[in-house]
Amino acid sequence: MGRYLAHRILHSFVVIWGAATLVFLILHLSPGDPAVNLVGENATQEQFELVRRSLGLDLPLHERYFNYLTDLAAGDLGTSWFVGQPTVDMLLERLPDTIELTLVAALIGIPLAIGLGIVSAVFRRSGLDYMANIVALFGLSTPNFWLGVMLILLFAVELRWLPSMGRGPVFHEAIAAIFSGQIKPLADWASHIVLPAVTLGTFLMALVTRLTRTDILENLGRPYVKVARAKGASNWGVIYHHVLPNSLISVVTVIGLEVGSLLGGAVVTETVFAWPGMGRLLVESIQRRDYPVIQAGVLLTSFVFVFVNILIDLIYVYLDPRIRLK
């Protein structure tokens, strides 16, 4: 276990370094100059050059990259060029909202997907199977931004059941209000988060549904299923105790890999629904070319992605004790 964790930590540093290098090169080699956004179009050439020197943009690319890695090694993720706040403070202020949205999307999508996958496999070639496949195909082929806009048009504009954008009370405040006898804050929180969470979790739900169905169908034909049924186990008992645990290993793998996709998808979803999360902050920073915030946001996303994948590897051992981390 110790050697495995050491290897994974080393691999994680390589992944994070690669992400940091890639985003640095993309930002600094792309057309345009952030100094123009800072000084404005009516600034003099002297003011423009002064801002470029203060930001270090007048240095050669390799010197800027070396300074960036040096600051990164010292734990300094920089300060926003436009806001003047440390990038860590800005991201940590928005991160809870993104995590909340991502978790709700996963809690809606994953259980529904596993249930649809089981029903689709057990009742293969039935109406339920065809319906589940249609839902999965729709989720796989529908872009997040289009689905979000359609949900807003239907539930916010036409039916007026739900708000179109923004967020309600913070979740822990809504829960605390219940103990004071107030249920409205929790309902307000749910009404604001349901549309962006459904939009964000639809692709994950569709992917996990298809994978669960495929794995369960494959495992239903294995010899151990026939042995379990010969011993008198019921059909649902065989699925719950034998087939499902063996099918969940690949499902858990995909869920771990898709966490990064959820965080990436949150950028679009938060923009569509004006959700005040980290994704929306990154979009705003990209529009004004605030390099420190963009770089810190990508690093934080990479760290979360790597951490979740290490956690997934540890879950493997719980799902299948035959797997040993060496």
Image (spheres, helix red, strand yellow):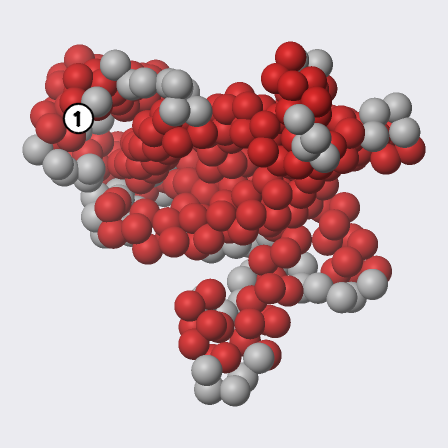
Residue 137 percent coordinates (x, y) = 77, 27
* Front one among 86 and 60: 86
Q: Residue furthest bottom?
A: 181
Q: Quarter of the image containing the N terminus? A: top left
Q: Measuring 72% from the left and 35% from the top, which residue is drawn there?
A: 234
Q: Residue furthest right?
A: 127
Q: Measuring 73% from the left and 53% from the top, which residue is drawn there?
A: 152
Residue 201 occupies quadrant? top right
* Front one among 242 and 79: 242
Residue 38 percent coordinates (x, y) = 32, 42
Q: Quarter of the image containing the C terminus? A: top left
* Front one among 277 and 13: 13
Q: Does residue 61 appear in the picture of this structure? A: yes
Tag 1 secondary structure: helix
* Front one among 48 and 26: 26
Residue 298 percent coordinates (x, y) = 35, 32
Instruction: Give the side of residue 110 with respect to residue 92, left or right.
Output: right
* 156 in relation to 184, above or below: above
Residue 18 occupies quadrant? top left
* 54 in relation to 186, above or below: above
Instruction: Give the side of residue 269 with respect to residue 287, left or right.
Output: right
Query: What count of labels does the image hold?
Result: 1
* 199 in relation to 68, above or below: below
Q: Measuring 88% from the left and 24% from the top, which residue is drawn there?
A: 125
Q: Measuring 48% from the left and 73% from the top, which residue is drawn there?
A: 174
Please name the residue that numbered disc 1 is placed on: 68
